[in-house]
Amino acid sequence: MQLVEVKKKNFSDYLQFIDTETMDELAFLVQKLKNKKIAMISATAYGGGVAEKMHSLVPLMQDLGLQVDWWVILGHDEFYGVTKTFHNRMQGQEGKLTPEQKEIYRRYNQTNAAHMQGWPYDIFVIHDPQPAALIAYREKREHENWLWRCHIDTSTANKDCWDFLYQYTKLYNAVIFTMKDYILGDYFEKADIITPSIDPLSLKNIALDKEKAEAIISRFGIDPLRPLICQVSRFDPWKDPLGVIDVYKIVKKEFPSVQLALVGSMATDDPEGWDYLYNTLRRAGEDYDIKVITNFNGISDLEVNAFQTVSDIILQKSLREGFGLTVAEGLWKGTPVIGGNVGGIKLQIEDGVTGYLVETVEECAEKTLTLLRNPLLAAEMKDAGREKVKKEFLVTGNILHYLRLFRRLVQPAF
């Protein structure tokens, strides 16, 4: 296990996003939990939405006065290859786990659990399938509470994979899903719903001067004077970057000057991502108006911010999606978002008000053309999208939901 060092954040900077009543409740909950030690455990310290959320959630909880640490498990390619299969199967991919895959998964969880003996924590929050079996290999002390946080769209989960994972997740004191539709298994009163969130003051989401943003994207060969469509996501079949390229090709017939940027980071726990990146590059071919850009090309949070700020339209054409933080990020910046009509995207996009929900490549292209033809319509969506994110999807609200749950677990009579 490796302890993640997080950069300090000041919660006082976030008071502009919450009302007095919320701040009073946060202060009350912190007072009740101040003597409890909390461990967040995930698969990786960077790359992907879970790590991104942790880099805001953990330091802000710490600044509020809570004792919170963030740990990442240790693994190698064979383990992450197996857990990538878990991820795909949990989102509906067919197939059965092999005995060897199960043995690899158990062995790495057992090895990581051995590092946890004697840990002084009262609350463990385990994120996603990779470390879910830790609870079975560490002697659970009487005062401990274990929470499993599932960030995946499990509404159509592969039964074989789910049954294997359920033998571990049913041991937890509580489980957290993003939507009710994702809850499988007989968790009864153990299940809670908490939507993910964005950090409005992170480098990725702070207000960025448009001229500065245009200068940044120009470094990647983008012409800021021409229309720009952008999708920010991992290179993953569920994110459908190949479908996004097909959308672009349809749109380009009417708007020959349109450009497409596919922006993503390569995560350490996603070895399959490289193969799909190469598939994406092959589909893009020699069209120089398609830019495929990763963290290995110099993309960091500031550059993502610039692309989302300058883009005329942001796509998140996912086929499965636990939540899709990039949707909230785009809406926060006042950019219309067209997203797949799946999972947590449906929680964020109000169809026809803050963007559009689509089912197919053709429908996505049609809605993209609608917005490019009608810039006034796109402008009308700006305020509605930002207001929705402020009310429902900021990190301040996320912290409040977590603390309420922690409080109920450690003092059930509350």
Image (cartoon, helix red, strand yellow):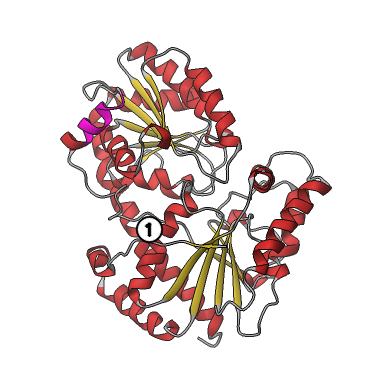
Frontmost residue, 115 versus 319: 115
> Residue 336 in magenta?
no
In the depicted structure, whether residue 52 falls above or below residue 260 = below
Find residue 73 and report its image quarter: bottom right
Frontmost residue, 246 versus 282: 282
Find residue 310 and report its image quarter: top left
In x, y percent, where is residue 10?
27, 67
Circle 1 sits on which residue?
Answer: 392
Q: Is residue 349 visible?
A: no
Q: Main secondary structure of the magenta part?
A: helix
Going by the image, does 262 lie left or right of 118? left
In the depicted structure, whether residue 175 falls above or below residue 196 = below
In this picture, which residue range is highlighted in magenta? 213-220
In x, y percent, where is residue 317?
48, 34
In x, y percent, where is residue 42?
55, 58
Callout 1 amino acid: Glu
> Residue 218 in magenta?
yes
Q: Which residue, as the protein is rendered here, is positioned at the far right?
A: 99
Going by the image, does 106 lie left or right of 38? right
In x, y percent, where is residue 211?
16, 34
Question: Please, what secondary structure does the residue beneath circle 1 have?
Answer: helix
In the depicted structure, whether residue 345 falls above or below residue 399 = above
Which residue occupies 61% across, 85% down? Answer: 143
10 Å crowding of disc 1: few (<14), some (14-19), many (20+) = some
Which residue occupies 76% across, 47% down? Answer: 101
Frontmost residue, 189 versus 122: 122
Q: Is residue 295 visible?
A: yes
Going by the image, does 75 lie left or right of 265? right
